[in-house]
Amino acid sequence: MRSLLFVAAALSIVISALIVYTLFTEAWTFLSGLIDEAGIGALIDSGKAPGWYPRNSRFDIPTIVYGTLIVSMVSIVVAAPLGLGAAVYLSEYASPRARRVLKPILEVLAGIPSVVFGFFALRVLGPDLIKPLFDTTQNTSLLVTGVAIGVLVTPLMASVSEDALRSVPSSLREASTGLGARKSATVVKVVLPAAVSGIIAALLISISRAIGETMIAALASGRLGQSPRTIDPRDPGLPMTSAMAQLAVGSDQVTGSSLAFQSLFLVGALLFLMTLVLNIIAGRVVRKLRNAY
Amino acid sequence: MNGALDIMTKVEVTSEASTEPVAMSEAAVFSTRDLAVYYGAFRAVREVSLSILRNEITAFIGPSGCGKSTVLRCFNRMNDLIPSARVEGEVRFHGVDLYDSQVNAVEVRRRIGMVFQKPNPFPKSIYDNVAYGPRLAGVKRKGELDDAVEKSLRGAALWDEVKDRVKASGLSLSGGQQQRLCIARAIAVEPEVLLMDEPCSSLDPIATARIEDLMQEIKSEYTIIIVTHNMQQAARVSDRTAFFTTEVNTESDRRTGVLVEFAPTATMFSTPSDDRTEAYVSGRFG
Amino acid sequence: MAITAAIAASTTTSVRAALTESKRDVRGYIFAGALLLCLLSALFVLTVLMWDVIASAIPVFDKRSTGFLTSDLASSPDKAGVSQGIWGSLMIAGFVVVLAFPIGIFAGVYLEEYAKSNRLTRFIELNIRNLAGVPSVVYGILGLVVFVKGLSWLTGGRSVIAAGITLAILVLPIIIITTAESVRAVPSGLREAGFGVGATQWEVTRDHVLPYAAPGILTGTMLAVARALGEAAPLLLIGAITGRLASLPGESMVDQLQGKFTAMPIVIYGWANEVNKPGKITGLTFEDLNAAAIVVLLAMVLLLNGAAILLRNRFEKRRQG
């Protein structure tokens, strides 16, 4: 029996190995093809109007990386204050009854599929809110995508932060109150600092989720598979996940036959590396801060 | 002149056994009259009336569950933190009813400090732990903070042990040191009173002895009330002792705490007036 | 006595003054208010979203009623429906339960009950934690290369089988982690009692630990299935059909499982990219139909999620009480 159970657990190693193997062999196929065709420098477009145009064999990595970075930054600007604020309220101010009702609601909302937010971004957020407010050129843009992903990730941020706050022992709050601190002082000067490692972990988890989010990016970023390089959030753009989605749905989906399609795997490998690094840093930060005090 | 009259009348201890009337009115820091605490509908403690005198160490002793900590926490309004808790009767601090609606609990706690059963230093440096109170009070300049921290750590007999590592984490100290850190933290806000809720119960005997010595050292500057389940400790350190016990309500099977006797320590332990007190201090129950 | 009375009185007065002097804690109120605003904003946005979706979906069910649920994908909003999406999603859920549930539970049990604390175990646990954080689109790549291309003899290429296996792999870490947590929460006294009467490790696990942990494990599985139902990115990579999908009558089950497919999230994605021309008969646009499709998907996902959370909360309370 024991061996059977062990096999089940060890399967996870097999899966990880498979992911790494497929990603990197396919990405390498792309890179070697690219080197044959245009040289490795083609990954950074040095022309006057750089951009990601896979059908023209122009694979400007910065275009899609900027897209992902801008979208994630916007999403964190939305999700971090809203999520953390909601978490602090739930943990420190809400009555136990309110908390019993609100926290499950938050958890259920965290389960809303992202494609629903994509729909929401296209239908309401872009045309009715972002376009008029920020005067963007069209209804879809990196900004819209970022805000929609921010809303998607807020319940996650709130839920994980709230867990971190609740795990601060109540004896610390008591000590602070006993010294004559007002509630806001206790929260800001004792509880939040004590929970900081958990909150940073929440932040990194949320960023990781935002970076990897595909459906909203595919629907609301505004470009269909190709895009000039831009750093303005109000422009339409092409985050990495959107590029991947368009490549998968668009061209002829036979691996190896088309350099454009093959670029999908390089982008996937890059994405995997980014989220892996983030997750590892999150683990390290949590452990380091937890041990410091 | 109402305040003065109140103090003067309330120094008489009205409890079940008679004791020497406490005469020095202006030395009474606290006085309670018919203090009772309810959790919801359950009466946890009833009709406590006593006076706490300045610069004395008063001990609350009794078996567990008799409400000693509950009564202690009335003196700095910490029972406010429990939603179902309700206080009836009077608790007066220098004649002022602490539960008057106009009284600000935050200000109360700045004058009446507390040390808890299990040491609870903040996960900050030793320095930041002690400086927490003064910073709350608005002290900002480093020089002033440094002085306050050193003074408090000296006052808690911890300075010599930590003076080279005040930036180390408060949690890196031993249990006894942590508790002295908590005492330093409490006296850094320069309170008038120190409430100590079984401060030595999680410490070893050596650490306990150090804290008992400390209490004697600082007695001249503070008024101290200590709750302890260790009656030898009460006999060692306190000037006056209040003995509580529980009464079982036969209908509901709930226990209500009640003050049995309040007397100078020497008297209580040698010639207690009440049988229950005598049974407890001679070790027959508890 | 008059002098002491006077001293006492003045002490009282000054103490009272000090204790009642307080500026109302305005900053504290504003702070708490700002926090409440954050909570309400988050809930408000999500509520508005739900409201908008439901309001737009009502005319669809009104005009098309159950036909919406039973029709196939089509080029006109008058005829298009979500039946194939529902079928695909249910098949995928089935694969998740059949594959990920047993493997996940076994792995979780192994990690908590059997594994010694050595490097290999820590490596496995690290692996699982990392897998839980991998973007779903990367799982899609795995599915495309390994199951669609590599094992096409088994899966039939771009099929529900490939999708089901891929999504089972995607949610596997979730089931492992929640199983491990549920098993960890079993009090050790229970195990000791079992060992005390001479049971083997597996017998203790099977007869004592698993029944106690069952609610938590069930909750984890429900959450995992809800997650699998909502994922679209891997399906895009595997090649779920977004346009029209012909349904041949009389197809065998195997053919159906190995043939082209779609699922609810992909239907939604596809319709979101459609042109918004109102159908001639009903006047509905694909955007309206999409709102209704979202309602169907949300019904499946949120009901599962809600039930799982209620289940977990009820059993936690029973455990503590």
Image: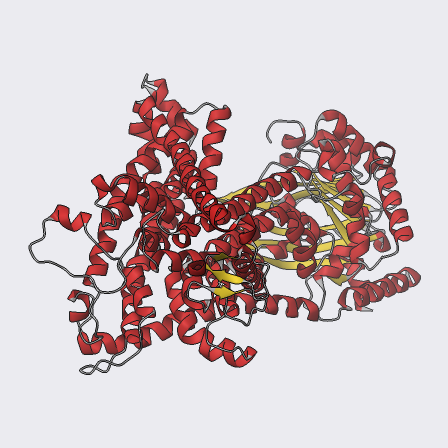
Q: Can residue B40 be seen in this view?
A: no
| Model colouring | secondary structure
Q: Can residue B183 be seen in this view?
A: yes
Q: In which quarter of the image is the C terminus of chain B?
A: top right
The quadrant where residue B99 appears:
bottom right
In the displayed structure image, the side of residue C221 where residue A286 appears, left or right? right
Query: Relative to B31, does residue C126 appear above or below in the rendering?
Result: above
In-front residue for pair A174/C251? C251
- Residue placed at 76% from the left, 62% from the top? B96
- Residue placed at 81% from the left, 68% from the top? C17
Give residue C56's position: percent from left, percent from top.
31, 76
Q: How many marks?
A: 0
In-front residue for pair A58/B18? A58
Residue at the outermost left position? C250
Residue at the outermost right position? C3
In the displayed structure image, the side of residue C124 where residue C103 appears, left or right? left
Give residue C285's position: percent from left, percent from top.
27, 78
- Residue placed at 81% from the left, 47% from the top? B187
Give residue B58's position: percent from left, percent from top.
76, 42
Q: In which quarter of the image is the N terminus of chain B?
A: bottom right
Residue at the outermost front position? A37
Query: Relative to C190, does residue A265 appear above or below in the rendering?
Result: below
Give residue C25's position: percent from left, percent from top.
70, 68
The quadrant where residue B33 appears:
bottom right
In the displayed structure image, the side of residue A26 where residue B223 appears, left or right? right
In-front residue for pair A196/A232? A232
In the displayed structure image, the side of residue B214 where residue A13 appears, left or right? left
